[in-house]
Amino acid sequence: MNKKYTYVWVSLIVLIFGIIVVPRIVDRLQSGTVVDMDRMNIVPQEKGLSYVLLNKVKRKVPSFQFINQDSLLISDKDYIGKVYVVEFFFTSCPSICPIMTENIVTLQNYFKDQPDFGVASFSITPDYDTPKVLKQYAKKYGITDIDWHLLTGNKEAVYDLANSGFNIFAAEMPDSPGGFEHSGLFALVDRQGYIRCRLDKFGNPIVYYRGAITREMGKNDYGEEEQISVLQEDIQKLLQE
C-alpha cells in the first residue's frame, strides 16, 4: 500500500479514537470510577459498604468458639443476623484498651435500642482473663449490652483468630506496655458474617477502624483522625441493609 494512504488511515484512526474514547476516559477519571473499579481488594459497591477480599473472595469471619463473661459458650453462629464490632484486648492493658472500651461503650449506648447490634471482644491474655475477671471488667466500664461478649479461651486459638482470621496484629512482647502488643483496630461484620468497610477519600478501603482515638481527642500524636464517628455511621448502614 502507498505510504501516503497508510499515513492517512493511521491519522483517521487516531482522530476517531480521540473523538470517541478520550472524552469517556476523562469523564471516568473526573468521576473517580477508574480508580474505584481498579481496586483489587474490595468488591465495588454502588452504595453502602464494600466487602473486604482475600484472594478475590469475600472475607468472612472464621468459625470460633469461646467462653464469655457469664461462663456461656459463644460462637460465631451466635452473631449471625447481627451487625457487630470485633476487637482484641486484655483487661490488664495499661495503654490503649481502656480507650478502645470507652469508644465501644459509646457505640453501645448509641445503639441501645438496636437488638441486632453486638460486640465481640477477644482477650489476648486468656490465661489471666477468666470469666470472673471479664465480668468485673464489664461492670467497671459499664458494659450492659447482652450481645457484647467478652471472650476467653484457648490462647493459640485467640492468636490465630487475630493474626490469621482478621489480620489484626496481636503478640506477646515483654518490652511493650503490659507485656503484649496489639493494633487497637476494630473490625466491622455484617449480618451474614462478612467483614465490611468504607472507602477513604482516595477510593481505598480502610478495612479496619481506629479504636484507640476518641472523638474528644480528634487526632492522635501521629495526626491520625478518630474513626469512631465513621464506624457509627457504617454500623447504621449495615443495620439498614
Image (tube, rainbow, N blue to C red):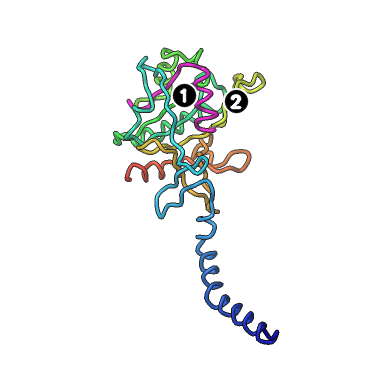
Residue 165 forms part of the magenta stretch:
yes
**Res 187 label:** none
Please tell me in which quadrant of the rendered image residue 241 appears: top left
Q: Looking at the picture, how far across and down is residue 135, in whole percent?
A: 40, 17
* Residue type of the residue flagged with mark 2: Glu
**Res 122 label:** 1
From the viewer's perspective, is 189 left or right of 213?
A: left
Quadrant of the frame with the N terminus = bottom right
Spatial CA span between label 1 and label 2: 14 Å
Pick whichever of labels 1 and 2 is earlier in the sequence: 1
From the viewer's perspective, is 47 left or right of 126?
A: left
In the image, residue 204 sits, relative to residue 1, either above or below, namely above
Numbered disc 1: secondary structure: strand
Q: How many marks?
A: 2
Question: What residue is drawn where x is 46% and y is 24%?
Answer: 122
Question: What residue is drawn where x is 57% and y is 26%?
Answer: 170
Near mark 1 (Cα within 10 A), the count class, few <14, some 14-19 or many ≥20, is many
Near mark 2 (Cα within 10 A), the count class, few <14, some 14-19 or many ≥20, is some
Whether the residues at callouts 1 and 2 have beta carbons within 8 Å, the answer is no
* Residue type of the residue flagged with mark 1: Phe
Which segment did they paint magenta?
146-167
Residue 1 forms part of the magenta stretch:
no
Q: Looking at the picture, how far across and down is residue 7, in whole percent?
A: 67, 83
Q: Looking at the picture, how far across and down is residue 50, in whole percent?
A: 44, 47
Q: Looking at the picture, how far across and down is residue 149, in whole percent?
A: 39, 24
In the image, residue 171 sits, relative to residue 205, either above or below, namely above
Question: What residue is drawn where x is 46% and y is 28%?
Answer: 101
**Res 181 label:** 2
